[in-house]
Image (tube, helix red, strand yellow):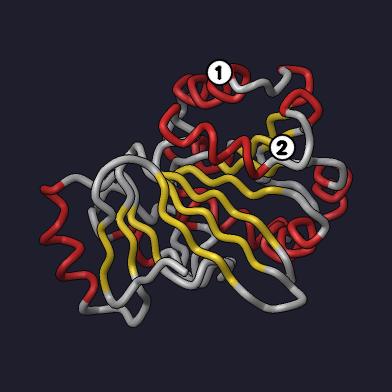
Amino acid sequence: MSYQLLLTSSGIVPEIREEFLSLLKKKPEENKVAFITTAAHGASKDVAWMQKDKELLYAYGIKKENLEDLDIKDKTKSQLEKILENKDIIFVEGGNTFYLLYWAKRSGLDKMLPELLEYGSLYVGISAGSYLACPTIEMAAWKRQDLNKIGLTDLRALDLAPFLITAHFEEKYRSVIDKAAKTTNYPIVALTDKQAIIIKKNSTSQKIEIKAIGPGKKEFWNGFKEQ
């Protein structure tokens, strides 16, 4: 399958604006966006902080009327198909990763996304939304900031990115990631809030391109390599 992913730590911050725009297949104002809010609702009752991520999209040319909020909780697969079938960008907001994965599986979104991406939709993740694209979400528990309040036991995720991401990296977390890296076989990339990863896969050649973007040193573990 073919797909394009933009996996961020803290959204499409100005430092990665140009790379985001380069991934769009239409003019910014022509893109229709599904803005998946579920992880945020799983983390807090007050989700007003999501507005800053929307405002950045608007600043880059996305029209407000072309952005649709979507909470996948309690949605059926057929409901999601109707909402997502004409979307150019599937934007998955941050929040509680366990809650997000639980509802992605319950709703059928996890099975639907690969097909949507094959047809050309761009996947953009923030923090938990980026974790969802990885093989598992085991890293969500590393810094003990993301609580498994929903009791999820199967942590397998979309497996679109062949590595694990740990978001919001600061030097104080290095020892935590050093320790966690010894418990997993997956490569790891740590992203600061100004960094992101672009992944492009071509279905014909099966070639996968991986590029770390944004300012500052890139932090890798377990043999992670750009390609």
Question: Percent x, y for residue 85?
Answer: 86, 47
Q: Residue at x 60, y 25 (%)?
A: 57
Label 1 or label 2, whichever lies nearer to me, is 1
Residue 186, compared with residue 58, is above or below; it is below
Q: In this figure, what is the number of numbered marks?
A: 2
Q: Which mark is residue 34?
A: 2
Amino acid marked by disc 1: Glu
In front here: 107 or 205? Answer: 205
Instruction: Describe residue 78's horizontal placement relative to residue 37 as left or right.
Output: right
- Counting from the top left corner in percent of width and height, residue 186 is at 37, 77
Q: Is 149 on the left or on the right of 34, as rendered?
A: left
Name the element at disc 2.
strand
Q: Position of residue 100 (x, y in %)?
A: 54, 51
x 45%, y 23%: residue: 49
Q: Which residue does the image show at 77% across and 76% down from the upper left?
A: 204
Which tag, 1 or 2, sits closer to the chain's start?
Answer: 2
Q: Does 110 appear above or below 168?
A: below
Find numbered disc 1 in the image and state the secondary structure of the residue it sits on: helix
Disc number placed over residue 55 in the picture, else none? 1
